[in-house]
Image (tube, helix red, strand yellow):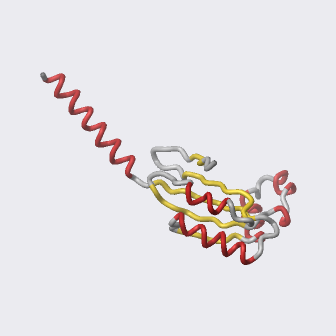
Amino acid sequence: MGGVAAIVGALAATAVTLAVTRTQPHEYAVSVFLEEDATPEQKAAVESALDALDPVERKFESREQAWENYRKLFKDRPDLLSAGSLEAMPESFRLKTKSRMFDCAPLVRVRELAAVDKIQVIQRPTEDEAGAEIACG
């Protein structure tokens, strides 16, 4: 009987641990890269469509800001610095959202907008899990 109780206790503890850790929300970083010729109206449409993701933080990154960030990121890599340029940097919307699981459905509307070139979703790492890129079809 003692062995059965120990097994039942271990199973219950495992179930509680899984339930607690799975209910913790993940943080996701979503980058929506724009076409080079995106108009102000198209950018506004993208920004509006991003509201469906319930962002906790959202910002627009201009070509100049992207180039500055690129230069900071690769300051110790002259080979990569020389390969980049201001003209090659896309404008983008960068947002963070939190949820237990990432729902790709709201991105369908965003992806269909004329100004959108590419979308990238990254699940940020936690103490217990590695980060990962989320494939949203």
Which residue reaches farthest bottom?
A: 40
Q: Quadrant of residue 76?
A: bottom right
Nearer to me, 80 or 93:
93
Q: Which residue does the image show at 62% across and 62% down from the upper left?
A: 109
What percent of the width, then of the height, locates residue 60? 66, 71
Residue 115 place in picture, x, y as percent: 74, 66
Which one is nearer the viewer's eye here, 81 or 36?
36
**Does residue 2 appear to the left or right of 70 in the view shown?**
left
**Lateral position of residue 127 relative to residue 92, left or right:** left
Q: Quadrant of the N terminus?
A: top left
In front of the other: 55 or 108 = 108
Q: Measuring 73% from the left and 70% from the top, which residue is drawn there?
A: 65
Residue 105 lies, in percent from the top left, at 56, 56
Q: Where does residue 77 sit, x and y in percent of width and height?
A: 79, 52
Residue occupying image coordinates x 72% and y 77%: 41
Task: Count up the numbered dots.
Answer: 0
Q: Is residue 5 above or below residue 68?
A: above
Quarter of the view holding residue 19: top left
Q: Residue lying furthest left in this view? A: 1
**On screen, residue 16 above or below 64:** above
Q: Is residue 37 left or right of residue 22?
A: right
